Image (cartoon, helix red, strand yellow):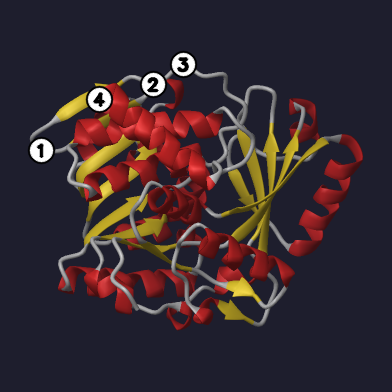
Amino acid sequence: MATVDLFAIGNALIDQEFKVSDTFISEQNLQKGTMQLTDGETQAELYKNLKASQVYKGQASGGSAANTTVAFSALGASAFYACRVGNDDLGTIYLNGLTEAGIQTSIKSISEGVTGTCMVLVSDDSERTMHTYLGITAELSDVQMDFEPLKTAQWLYIEGYLSTSDSARVAVKQARQIARENNVKIALTLSDPAMVQYARTGLDELIDDGVDLLFCNEQEAMMYTETTSVEAALAKLKLLSNEVVITLSAKGAIVSNQEQHFHVQGRKVIAVDTNGAGDAFSGAFLYALNQGENLQTAAQLAILISSEVVSKFGPRLEIAEYANLLETFKKECA
C-alpha cells in the first residue's frame, strides 16, 4: 500500500436529496438542520412521502468524512478512506465513486449487509436536514480497516458521527494509538449538533486526551462546551485541541491556537444547499496545511471551496472543479 497524506475514518452513506418545504419537515417530526438516525422501515416510509410530494434532486455518494476526503484528494493530495459498505449495488457505487476520485480503499470495507442511506432534505433557506439509516456502517469496526497506510500518513481524520457506534469508537481508539506512535497528526470534526446532544459521551471518547485540530460550527461549539458565546466555547475547546476552527456559515470562520487567533470573512454566494459544506471546508483546510501553507491561507482556501459547495445541490463538486478552484485561488493570492 502506497503512502498517503490523509487516513480518514467515517460512515459510508448514499444520499438521496430532496427540495422540501418547512411544513413537510414539521409534518414528519424532524428537527430542522440536524441529522436523525432511524431504521430502514421508517426511512422507507419517509422516502415514499418525499417522492410523492417533494422535489427529488438526485443521488450522491456521501458520508461526512468521505466528502472531506474527496475534497482533500481532488485538490491534489493522496488519501485512504476506511469505511464499511454492504455487498449490494449501492456499496459498489459508493466504493467506485471513491476510486474514481483517486482515493484508496480496502476490499475489507465490503461485508454482508445493506449499505447505509441518508435522506437529505434541503429547505428553501438552503438548510439541510438529514434522516439516516446507517445500515451496515453502524457496525464499522477495526475488521474493515487496513491500518498500514495510517503508519506513514500525515493526518488521521475522524468523523464525529462515529460517536454513536460502539465498535467504531473502539476502532478509532486503535487508530489514535497508531497515529500517536507514528507522529501522525489527528484531526476531528464534531459533525452535527445532534451528535453533541445525543452522543456526547461518544464524542468525548473519540476526542480522548485531545487532538491536534478540531473542526466544528458555532452551534456545535457552544453546545459541546455548554457555553453561550463562541468566544467562551473557543477557550474551552483549546484545552482539547492544539488548533480549533469554528465555522460561522456565511460569516466565515474563526481559527485559533496558542499563538494565533483570527477571523476569515465568508464569500458572498447564493446558498442552494448546505449539505457537505463543512466537510469540504475541512478537506480544503487540511489540504492546504499538508502543502505547508499557513493557517490564514488554509482558511481562505477552505472558505472558497465550501462556498462553491453551498452554491450547488449535492455534498460534493465535480472532481475537476476542485482543481479549477485551486488555480483560481492561486491567481488571487499571486
Given residues 143 and 240, the one toward you in this image is 143
Mark 2 sits on what residue? 266
Measured in 3D between alpha carbons, the distance from the residue under mark 2 to the one under mark 4, in whole angstroms, is 16 Å
Mark 1 sits on what residue? 258
Measured in 3D between alpha carbons, the distance from the residue under mark 1 to the one under mark 4, in whole angstroms, is 26 Å
Name the amino acid type tagged 2. Gly
Give the secondary structure at mark 4: helix
The reply to whether callout 2 and callout 3 are in contact (CB within 8 Å) is yes
* Residue 224 seen in the current view: no
Give the secondary structure at mark 3: loop
Given residues 146 and 116, the one toward you in this image is 146
Nearer the camera: disc 2 or disc 1: 2
Name the amino acid type tagged 1. Gln
Mark 4 sits on what residue? 333
Q: Earlier in the sequence, mark 2 or mark 4?
A: 2
Give the secondary structure at mark 1: loop
Nearer the camera: disc 3 or disc 4: 4
Name the amino acid type tagged 4. Cys
Residue 328, position in %: x, y? 37, 28
Mark 3 sits on what residue? 268
Residue ID at (37%, 24%): 252
Q: Earlier in the sequence, mark 1 or mark 3?
A: 1
- Place residue 103 in its image quadrant: bottom left
